[in-house]
Amino acid sequence: MLTLYRVVNWVFSVFSLILLAYVILSFVRPRPNWFTEALNRLVDTVLNPIRRFLRARLPVQMQILDWSPLVVYLLMRLVLLVLRLFVVGSIW
């Protein structure tokens, strides 16, 4: 079970870095190339359902920013916290 936690932690850490690169590149707006296209395809598959959910529930004033990367990151941290609670027995 500890191995499962370590694998999930590693996958979430790698995806967090990919998500950070996606957010930074969304501000810079580089020319489309193979890297940005692959990054967009990978991250958008995770972010699009969250975007649809947030668009349906957030007021228009809050929809100015894309909150989906933050929500995905917080959900990943929550999953890790719950998994750690079951594996280790303590949160810290």
Image (tube, helix red, strand yellow):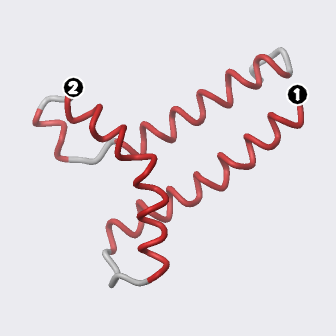
Identify residue for label 2.
57
Q: Nearer the viewer, residue 75 or 48?
A: 48
Quarter the C terminus occupies: top right
Identify residue for label 1.
1
Q: CA distance from mark 1 to mark 2?
A: 36 Å
Residue 42 coordinates in the image, percent (x, y): 49, 59
Q: Is residue 40 above or below residue 37?
A: above
Label 2's element?
A: helix
Residue drawn where x is 11% and y is 36% of the image: 61
Q: Nearer the viewer, residue 48 or 13?
A: 48
Residue 30 coordinates in the image, percent (x, y): 34, 81
Specify the label residue 69 is tagged with.
Answer: none
Q: Is residue 19 left or right of residue 53?
A: right
Q: Is residue 1 left or right of residue 75?
A: right
Label 1's element?
A: loop
Q: Is residue 7 left or right of residue 43?
A: right
Query: Can you tell which quarter of the image residue 71 is in?
Result: top left
Q: Is residue 77 above or below residue 24?
A: above
